[in-house]
Image (tube, helix red, strand yellow):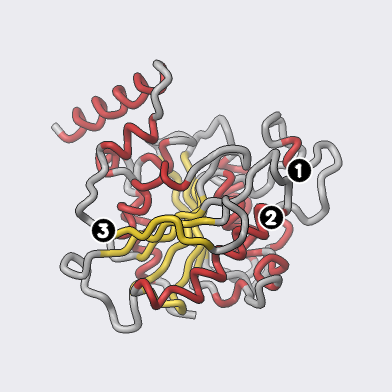
């Protein structure tokens, strides 16, 4: 019966997409509102896109641990040219309902900016999260960055390339870990025409790929991907990055999910789709198991 419900929900979501409705809006419409509290539109910078929403666990459902809840700063995908934090309420609900303070951040997009300006924004969001975590019941010593698709690239660069957090007087070593779902970590030259102008194709900036910044100082990682992906190669990006991190002595949890694709890798965090793949369970277990930094 559960599998039938999943198939129906997926079919309805695809139908919504085909007739021009927002699939994310459809998923959010099925997301409960009584499993968390939310503070919307908090500014971490001066630009109108420098805003985030904070989803907090309900203490009645998830007793606050000593020191506070773990904190995840989430960056959505969209080829660095689209996306709105409000579309990812289902991600905030998923993690907050499991006892994780979750901050879903907007950042500047192309054509307003190109690489690396969106990484400057992401670093500022992380600095804000660390500074304000306790005000929302979070533990700044258990701070994670997480992303999907191009947002996973952002999370990877924040966690692996020390330049961005150094600009806000922080270091990746203060992160308890990072989570990347279906992220592009080694993708130059890219055939994605939407991504090409973001990175000045064909004159790619040096040091602009996460795979170039692996070191033994990197925080522990959770890397998840579909076993087949027509958008981002799970072998070239996810597997190769995991191998390189492990060779450097970095703890890595690596999972490939057979019943997902590039887009449902994040969609399965929504309540109606969670039985499709245990991505949420695996991410939550990783966060809970990581020691404070």
Q: Front-most of 34 and 170?
A: 34
User: Where in the figure is residue 159, as x and y percent of width and height?
Assistant: 60, 64
Which comes sooner in the sequence, label 2 or label 3? 3
The residue that disc 3 covers is: 36
Q: Secondary structure at mark 3?
A: strand
Q: Residues within 10 Å of mark 2 (few under 14, many from 20)?
A: many
- Image height check: is 194 above or below 100? above
Q: Residues within 10 Å of mark 3 (few under 14, many from 20)?
A: many
- What is the C-alpha distance between the residues marked 2 and 3? 36 Å
Q: Secondary structure at mark 2?
A: helix
- What is the C-alpha distance between the residues marked 3 and 1? 38 Å
The residue that disc 2 covers is: 211
- Image height check: is 228 above or below 254? above
> Do the residues bearing badges 2 and 3 touch, measured as CB atoms within 8 Å?
no
Q: Quadrant of residue 3?
A: top left
Image position of 160 (left or right of 105): right
- Image height check: is 99 above or below 16? below
Q: Is residue 26 visible?
A: yes
Residue under the point 21% across and 70% down: 59
Residue under the point 66% across and 56% down: 119
Q: In the orientation shown, which residue stands out farthest toward the bottom?
A: 66
Q: Nearer the viewer, mark 3 or mark 1?
A: 3
Q: Nearer the viewer, mark 2 or mark 3?
A: 3
The residue that disc 1 covers is: 199
């Amino acid at each position: 019966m559960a599998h039938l419900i999943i198939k129906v929900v997926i079919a309805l979501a695809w139908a919504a997409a085909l007739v021009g409705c927002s699939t994310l809006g459809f998923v959010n419409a099925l997301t409960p509102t009584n499993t968390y509290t939310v503070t919307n539109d908090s500014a971490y910078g001066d630009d109108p896109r420098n805003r985030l929403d904070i989803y907090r666990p309900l203490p009645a459902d998830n007793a606050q641990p000593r020191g506070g809840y773990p904190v995840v700063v989430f960056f959505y995908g969209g080829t660095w040219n689209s996306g709105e934090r409000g579309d990812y309420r289902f991600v905030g609900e998923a993690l907050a309902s499991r006892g994780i303070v979750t901050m879903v951040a907007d950042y500047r997009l192309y054509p307003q900016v190109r690489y690396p300006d969106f990484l400057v924004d992401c670093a500022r969001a992380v600095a804000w999260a660390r500074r304000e975590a306790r005000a929302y019941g979070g533990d700044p010593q258990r701070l994670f960055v997480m992303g999907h698709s191009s947002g996973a690239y952002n999370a990877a660069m924040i966690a692996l390339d020390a330049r961005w957090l150094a600009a806000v007087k922080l270091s990746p070593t203060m992160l308890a870990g990072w989570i990347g779902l279906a992220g592009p970590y080694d993708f130059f030259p890219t055939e994605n025409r939407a991504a090409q102008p973001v990175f000045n194709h064909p004159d790619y900036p040096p040091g602009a790929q996460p795979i170039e910044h692996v070191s033994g100082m990197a925080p522990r990682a959770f890397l998840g991907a579909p076993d087949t992906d027509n958008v981002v190669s799970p072998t070239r990006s996810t597997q190769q990055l995991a191998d390189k991190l492990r060779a450097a002595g970095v703890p890595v949890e690596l999972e490939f999910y057979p019943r997902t694709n590039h887009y449902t890798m994040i969609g399965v965090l929504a309540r109606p789709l969670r039985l499709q793949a245990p991505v949420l369970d695996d991410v939550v277990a990783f966060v809970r198991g990581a020691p404070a930094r």
